[in-house]
Image (cartoon, rainbow, N blue to C red):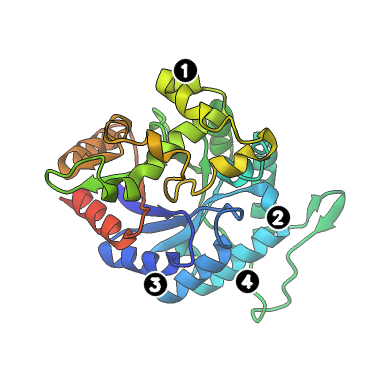
């Protein structure tokens, strides 16, 4: 099982990826959510200038945000910078990237068609899109690397439809809940922080570094209508804290600092008890127990998403726990 990292893309992410490479992380994927973060492809290309080894990619790309020709061109640009062996393309239906703009996720059939279209463009093929034929026709290597280009793909698929798309594309499966039994290559996303010896899970440092992880579960449950099932009475009270916000802009408030930090509405509900119950504030030994479970479950990569105001500390502590 290998170690990777994922980032809520920021203007500091290229430097954080450089640090991750020094710490031994083998892959760095960046979220694609323009309502919250800077452009993912621009930051990946900035990271390419600072690194020599680490694999770079999207984790995950949202199809509705870019025309497939634009995505194909972006991939060729990153391949030119680092080579095919250092590029990965993750794709999904759009939890944060769509919901933060008040839109539902993209249907999985469209996700699959989009990915297949981009892959065909990278092979140099002519493809039909919106009733017209298009093709990557970069005239020579001044404008892009020679085709065909083949890079690995990943699919963020929690449910059966996403799982099937991953299978159909022959892609690595990205999960945040639990590994899929019997699936081949799969990555588990881990969000949280490594506690120092004797550290209180409710301390300001811990909440700064990992409170976003507790908030993530609430946001997901609300957006998917599963508060009662997943969070019970405490979750209902938490969700009700957003009721005073007009429904047409409630998604903006809910995604304020989503997977970055704790917003003002969520803060009263994120306590040490919540952090511990969510399993996002663990000491190194408990994280190692978690790694062992994931490896036993068939996980081939774990990806850690750091947050807070000291991301270098988070990356270093997690790498030490993984390698300890």
Residue 146 has which mark? 4
- Nearer the N terminus, badge 4 or badge 1? 4
Locate residue 84, reporting x and y percent: 50, 64
- Nearer the N terminus, badge 1 or badge 3? 3
Residue 229 has which mark? 1
- Residue picked out by circle 2: 68
Element marked by disc 2: helix
Element marked by disc 3: loop
Q: CA distance from mark 2 to mark 1?
A: 37 Å
Q: Residues within 10 Å of mark 4 (few under 14, many from 20)?
A: some
Residue 184 in sight in this render? no
Nearest to the observer: residue 43 or residue 243: 243
Q: CA distance from mark 3 to mark 4?
A: 23 Å
> Which label sits in the foreground, 4 or 1?
1
Q: Residues within 10 Å of mark 1 (few under 14, many from 20)?
A: few
Nearest to the observer: residue 148 or residue 221: 221
């Amino acid at each position: 099982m290998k170690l990777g990292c994922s980032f809520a893309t920021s203007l500091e992410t290229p430097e954080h990826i450089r640090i991750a490479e020094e710490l031994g992380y083998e892959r760095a994927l960046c979220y694609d959510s323009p309502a919250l973060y800077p452009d993912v492809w621009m930051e990946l290309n900035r990271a390419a200038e600072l690194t020599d080894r680490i694999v770079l990619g999207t984790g995950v790309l949202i199809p509705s945000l870019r025309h497939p020709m634009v995505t194909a061109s972006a991939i060729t640009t990153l391949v030119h910078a680092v080579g095919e062996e250092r590029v990965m393309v993750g794709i999904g239906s759009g939890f944060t990237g769509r919901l933060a703009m008040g839109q539902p996720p993209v249907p999985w059939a469209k996700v699959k068609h989009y990915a297949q279209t981009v892959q065909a463009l990278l092979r140099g093929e002519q493809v039909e899109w919106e009733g017209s034929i298009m093709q990557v026709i970069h005239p020579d290597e001044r404008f892009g690397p020679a085709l065909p280009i083949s890079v690995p793909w990943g699919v963020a698929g929690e449910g059966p439809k996403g799982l099937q798309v991953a299978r159909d594309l022959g892609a690595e499966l990205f999960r945040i809940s639990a590994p899929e039994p019997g699936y081949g290559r799969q990555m588990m996303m881990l969000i949280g922080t490594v506690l120092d010896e004797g550290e209180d899970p409710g301390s300001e440092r811990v909440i700064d570094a990992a409170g976003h992880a507790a908030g993530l579960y609430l946001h997901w449950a609300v957006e998917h209508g599963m508060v009662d099932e997943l969070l019970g009475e405490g979750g209902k009270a938490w969700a009700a804290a957003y009721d005073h916000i007009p429904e047409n802009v409630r998604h903006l408030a809910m995604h304020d600092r989503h997977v970055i930090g704790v917003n003002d509405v969520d803060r009263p509900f994120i306590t040490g008890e919540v952090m511990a119950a969510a399993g996002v504030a663990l000491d190194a030994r408990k994280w190692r127990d978690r790694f062992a479970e994931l490896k036993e479950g068939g996980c081939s990569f774990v990806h850690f998403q750091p947050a807070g105001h000291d991301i270098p500390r988070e990356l270093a502590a997690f790498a030490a726990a993984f390698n300890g």
